[in-house]
Amino acid sequence: MKILMVCLGNICRSPLAEGILQDKALKAGLNWQVESAGTNGYHTGEPPHHLSIKVAAANGLDISKQRSRVFTSADLENYDLIYAMAPDVLAEMKWIARNDLDEKKVKLFLEESFPGEQKEVPDPWYGPEPGYHELFDIINNNCDNIIKQYINQEQENSNDK
Ligand code: 4NP
């Protein structure tokens, strides 16, 4: 399965979501390919924000080799599941895709933990370091839920057979 994480700049939130979910998928023995992109393109080609790199490293993950790239409508065909980090990101994605978003494939990331609540992963861009540690915890918990729910679903599907 190919999964894309999307935020605005692809330097703070979605690189962490990519690194964390990819690591958990590998550890769970799932053959997932997790990548990330941003809607605004302001940081294309840059590595993640140094504080995202720092909190990832503090938790044993190296995200420093990632490079920011812009989200395009072609991504809608190339991925099985696309997560927007916040409602404003989803609105930007709709604009880029000319409203043509498949709602089964494109979801708010925190829908997996707080369904129907339209929650955003807070943008730490303007704030100091503690915001990045909170960011790590929010993303990490949600990625645990994504993996748990996927494994439960797979079990239910195999019990139905
Ligand atoms: P991100 O944070 O979307 O989590 O990568 C941002 C980084 C940069 C900008 C906005 C958000 N920016 O406008 O440059």
Image (cartoon, rainbow, N blue to C red):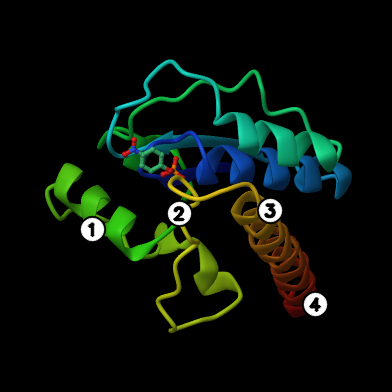
Q: Picture coordinates of residue 123 (x, y %)?
A: 45, 54
Which quadrant of the figure has residue 85? Answer: bottom left
Residue density around tag 4, few if under 14, some if 14–19, many if 20 or more, within 10 Å: few
Q: Which residue is mark 3?
A: 136
Per the image, the residue denoted by label 1 is: 91
Q: State how far apart marks 3 and 2 are (Cα).
A: 12 Å
The residue positioned 71% from the left and 45% from the top of the image is 20
User: Label 3 vs label 1: CA separation?
Assistant: 24 Å
- Residue 152 x %, y %: 77, 72
Give the residue furthest to the left. Answer: 98
- Mark 4 lies on residue: 159
Q: Residue furthest bottom?
A: 116
Instruction: Point out the image quarter for the N terminus.
Output: top right
Which type of secondary structure does the marked residue at label 1 adopt? helix
Residue 123's disc is: 2
Badge 1 local density, few (<14 within 10 Å), some, or many (20+)? some
Horizontal arrangement in the rendering, residue 21 relative to residue 41 (left or right): right
